[in-house]
Amino acid sequence: MAAVCLVSCKEDISTLVSAENAHPKQKDLDGEFFGVRKILGDGNCFYRAFCFAYLESIFHIPRALERFKQKIIQSGQVLAVAGFEESSFIHHLDTVVNVVEECQADEQESTLLKLFNDSAVSDGVVQYLRLLTSAHLQNFADFFCNFVEAPDLQVYCRQEVEVMAMECDHVDILALSQALDVGLHIVSLEGEQQQLVHYIIPEGAQPSLHLLYQSSHYNILYQRPELKNTSPLSPN
């Protein structure tokens, strides 16, 4: 049996839709982005896309890779403060650190793609990001409890955030973004608006990565070079 593709090679943006099933906002999407990298729709797509896209964005910036590695190492303390036993997360933390170190040691971007298509490695990264998201939510419970419908934030984290294959909500995205100090830009094809809907998380941040949201699924987008220094919220 062929291995499941968790993260695809970069493809032309036109591959998102078929000619007979074109999306009304496709033209606007084509005008802003030239490529897409498709992520398996297994309920973990946001976390997988987030980490791959961020590492790809800093792949050739040694200082940024080292800074991210140190951030991950230090984030173990965030989980400890939230009450997690080290034995419950240290293996997954080490997996993320090992991925970064392999990126540092090998300047071939194909290494990153290979790592994220190794299910044990890729899922280990996802699991750690889920635990870190949960810890950040709980450490700032006074703020985040206002955005969670569940009666108990800890129960929400245990049932909706930490469990693999559970789709993430906006509050989880904000928590992970804050925990790792990584800004992101989400482009949504949902809703009845005639134009694309743009979200910058956290608000006002300079995004390091771009994700497409459609039908409860996330893929990675690649912005056209001539638009890289413009705000996605600015009128054309």
Image (cartoon, rainbow, N blue to C red):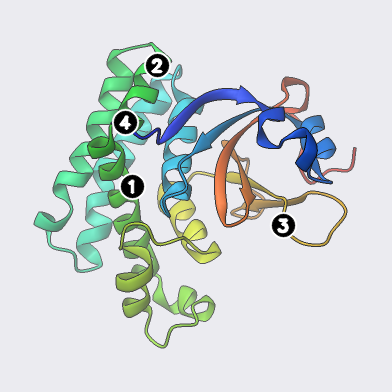
Secondary structure found at label 1:
helix
Give the mark, 3 or 2, whose residue is nearer the N terminus: 2
Secondary structure found at label 2:
helix
Q: Residue at x 42, y 16 (%)?
A: 109
Give the mark, 2 or 4, whose residue is nearer the N terminus: 4
Secondary structure found at label 3:
loop
Give the mark, 4 or 3, whose residue is nearer the N terminus: 4
Asked whether the beta carbons under mark 1 and mark 4 sit within 8 Å of each other, the answer is: no
Q: Where the N terminus falls, by quadrant?
A: top left
Q: Residue at x 25, y 34 (%)?
A: 97
Tell me the CA gap for discs 1 and 2. 19 Å
Residue flagged by tag 4: what amino acid is it? Ala
Instruction: Read off the residue under disc 1.
Output: 126
Above or below for 21 versus 138: above
Q: Which mark is residue 190?
A: 3
Instruction: Read off the residue under disc 4.
Output: 3
**Local crowd size for mark 4, using a 10 Å CA cut-off: few (<14), some (14–19), many (≥20):** few
Give the mark, 3 or 1, whose residue is nearer the N terminus: 1
Q: Residue at x 72, y 29 (%)?
A: 14
**Local crowd size for mark 2, using a 10 Å CA cut-off: few (<14), some (14–19), many (≥20):** few
Task: Say which of marks 2 and 4 sits in front.
Answer: 4
Asked whether the beta carbons under mark 2 and mark 4 sit within 8 Å of each other, the answer is: no
